[in-house]
Amino acid sequence: MPERLGIGIDFGTTNSAAAVYDGKRLQLVRLEAHDAIMPSATYIDTALRADTGQHAIDRYIQDNTGRTVEMVPEVIGETSQFVEHGDEEHPSAVDTVTQKVYGQPMTDSGLPGRLFRGTKRLLGDERVRRLLVFDHPFRLVALITPILLRIRKSVEASCGTFPEAHLGHPVNFEGRDDYRNQLALSRLSEAYRYAGVQGQRFYPEPIAAAVSYLHTGAFSGTHLLTVDFGGGTLDLCILRRRGMAFDVVATHGIGLGGDHIDQRLFRELLFPLLGKGEIWRRRGMDREIETLFPFEDYEDLLVNWAVTYTLNQNRYTAPVMDCIVQGGTAARKFQRLRDIIKRNASYMLFQCIKDLKATLSEQDSAKLDIPELDIELTVTRERFESIIADILVAVAEVVDATVARAGLAHKDIDVVLRTGGSSLIPAVTRILEGRFPGRVDLHDPFTSVAAGLAIASYEGLAPPG
């Protein structure tokens, strides 16, 4: 093995990657059986054993498919009172009667395991300190440590033990607290230590992507703007070239990513096919009652696929069955909703949506084909862009704000580097081309951050500031 190695670890909101650089060869580390990209997921079962990555997601789906959820009241306390059965003439012993105090029915009595994905989003939230997993309080650090441990072991299997690594982080973690970045980095550092990564150098993700791009030798200008549009966040930075080195002129970032776009597509394309807006007819005391089906009770659980299984309760399934029995043109829609609930199929639907989005990045129209639910829907790129119009406005505003923070004009930017899966959306490219014509380049959208971290680690580049 070379005497010196650069190690880069990109722990992402949705997916994670790692890379190794020896000064000549850059290599992605295989984190899954046949892939360098690993879902950032942890599944904890009732024995408190943890699975990570794709296996965690597969276990979650398998364990909850077809399972009827029974929510039982949670005991939140006990009350005691003294009860005397006798009277003044015939006194008797005093009994102590203890009664349990129950809260709302929020405990899933048959839950086989808990899936955690997107936990990175919570790291900057001071209010979220512990999550209860089978009556055991788990700190956020404990929920992400298994993922980082698996990454560390995969890196060591590839190149042996390593003294330190460059670790990616967004410019701004999600949240509103002024100290969210410090809190998130503190938690992330603790998790890495528990995972066995002691030598830590945190490095902003968009700057790492820029380092990877600069390493190719393709850049010869002065100012480089990186737009890293990933699954959870939109991060930007502007670098100023200084000989073989560079200065960080400005950074910016917001909590907006591909996951938000996927949820928007789910709502706009699939909700109308699942019963949203339909009438629910049910028998009352003396007449039939017609009301709008309460689809709003289902919406958040459908678009957050990790908790969709909780819809398989009588209070949710009974109204759906009523609407199926009443027949009519809407019955098929409610049959689809029932099938999603029974099959725990939201994750599969989101994979279909991601495939649709990828196809629309290359073609003017694409089919959302889901034979399991008898859905075949043609979506044009124009409709897709209208659905995410406000998201595109937010992207444009962040780009302009970053250039303004640097004290530059758009004409001063020599190259715009777009990376991250959501940067492949043609409308995002148009936004950039409209401001920086002929200067927009695409660079390894899914692995550039990990690669740049490994190069920065090898070169000993210090994080800005």
Image (tube, helix red, strand yellow):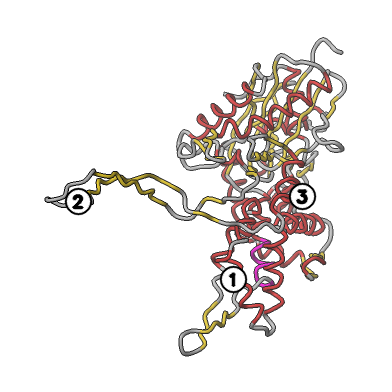
Dot 2: within a 10 Å radius of its alpha carbon, few (fewer than 14), some, or many (20 or more) residues?
Answer: few
Q: Can residue 304 be seen in this view?
A: yes
In percent of width and height, residue 98 lies at 34, 46
**Three-letter residue code for mark 2:** Gly
Q: Name the residue under label 2.
A: 86
Q: Name the residue under label 1.
A: 318
Q: In which quarter of the image is the C terminus?
A: top right
Sequence order check, earlier mark of 3 and 1: 1
In percent of width and height, residue 53 lies at 74, 39
Q: Name the residue under label 3.
A: 424
Q: Can residue 365 be seen in this view?
A: no
Q: Mark 2 and mark 3 in contact (Cβ < 8 Å)?
A: no
Looking at the rendered image, the disc whose residue lies closer to the viewer, 3 or 2, is 2
- Magenta stretch in the rendered image: 265-273
Horizontal arrangement in the rendering, residue 297 relative to residue 425 (left or right): left
Dot 3: within a 10 Å radius of its alpha carbon, few (fewer than 14), some, or many (20 or more) residues?
Answer: some
Horizontal arrangement in the rendering, residue 374 relative to residue 327 (left or right): right
- Check disc 2 and report its element: helix, strand or loop: loop
Q: Could you say which quadrant of the image residue 265 lies in? A: bottom right
**Three-letter residue code for mark 1:** Ala
Of residues 85 and 225, which is closer to you in this image? 85
Q: In which quarter of the image is the N terminus?
A: top right
- Image point (65%, 57%), residue name: 263
